[in-house]
Image (cartoon, helix red, strand yellow):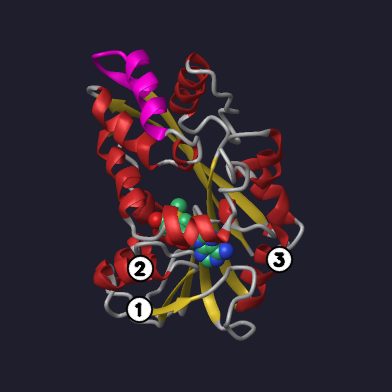
Amino acid sequence: MAGKSHTMTDRGYLTQVQYLTDANLVARQSIYAYQRPRIDLVETVLDLAALTGAETVADVGCGNGMYLAGLARRGHRGRVLGLDLSVGMLQAASGRAPGAALVNADAARLPLADGQADVTLAMHMLYHVPDKQAAARELRRITRPGGTVLVVLNDDDHQLQLRQLLASAAADIGMTVDPLYGWGLDAAPAGIRLGGGAELLATVFAVVQRHDFASELRVPDPQPALDYLRSMRLTQASGDPDRLLAAVAARLPAGPFTITTHCGCLICR
Ligand SMILES: C[S@@+](CC[C@H](N)C(=O)[O-])C[C@H]1O[C@@H](n2cnc3c(N)ncnc32)[C@H](O)[C@@H]1O
């Protein structure tokens, strides 16, 4: 299982495998159709941003453009920039947000001037940046004084049942996986969750406000959970995803399965 430890932050894995296209992300986004109560995270976060519609918005790690599309739906008039490490993700974003300027960039070294953005988004992406402190400083640097940075991260109990299931299935076939961090102890420092994110951002911003969003996925049968697990870094890094997923399938109940969801938005000023 060579290379299994650092897939969370490994540039080659992120740009050439996990986010080569948006297929893995789409597989994970799809499972939210089963969320009850449903939380529309894009709309909720954009509401928290309290936009007038005229701001310059930078979406760092924009992925396949869900937030860029949300801004377009709202008729946002200001300049919109989507930045991502993966060219494939930017291609996917271009279909969703034709009005946005898309830039291939690393969050730890953003090609933007100081104070260029009024509002900066970093949604579900800090997990992947090796130097998270540098990324936090960059988010602050590119945002004008008085502007707002919104960071979304998962909390520790997010999809814990799925990760525990994966760990138990892995143990069934002689693999060892930490349900929170991954394969091997040296993977742990790469992880960041909501609480750690709030602490990190408080070293860079004067004010960090935390908003939690907790709900459940009620999947009716095993297939959505298996599709989701197949898209995950933890599964792909196992060295034998098919065998691991067969072990998961043997443990999944034939009927409904409930999975906790818990993420939060950190509003930084
Ligand atoms: C989980 S996806 C989230 C996408 C989007 N923000 C969303 O919430 O739908 C993480 C994204 O971060 C990007 N990414 C990973 N490392 C990055 C880095 N160092 N700088 C910029 N983007 C990065 C990935 O290519 C991927 O598109």
Dividing the picture into quarters, in which one does residue 35 lie?
Answer: top left
Which residue lies at the image location 58% right of the left edge and 68% below the top edge?
107
Q: Out of 94 and 183, give the one closest to the viewer.
A: 183
Helix, strand or loop at mark 3: helix
**Ligand 1 neighbours mark 2 (CB distance < 8 Å):** no
Determine which of the numbered discs, if any, sits on residue 244 in the image. none
Residue that label 2 marks: 68
Residue 91 in the image: state x and y as whole percent: 32, 71
Magenta segment's dominant SS is: helix
Q: Out of 7 and 242, give the one closest to the viewer.
A: 242
Residue 225 against residue 201 in the figure, above or below: above
Crowd class of label 1 (few under 14; some 14 to 19; many from 20; radius 10 Å) = many
Residue that label 3 marks: 134
Helix, strand or loop at mark 1: loop
Q: Quick one: quadrant of the C terminus?
A: bottom right
Magenta-drawn stretch contains 85: no
Q: Amino acid at mark 2?
A: Leu
Residue 47 against residue 78 in the figure, above or below: above
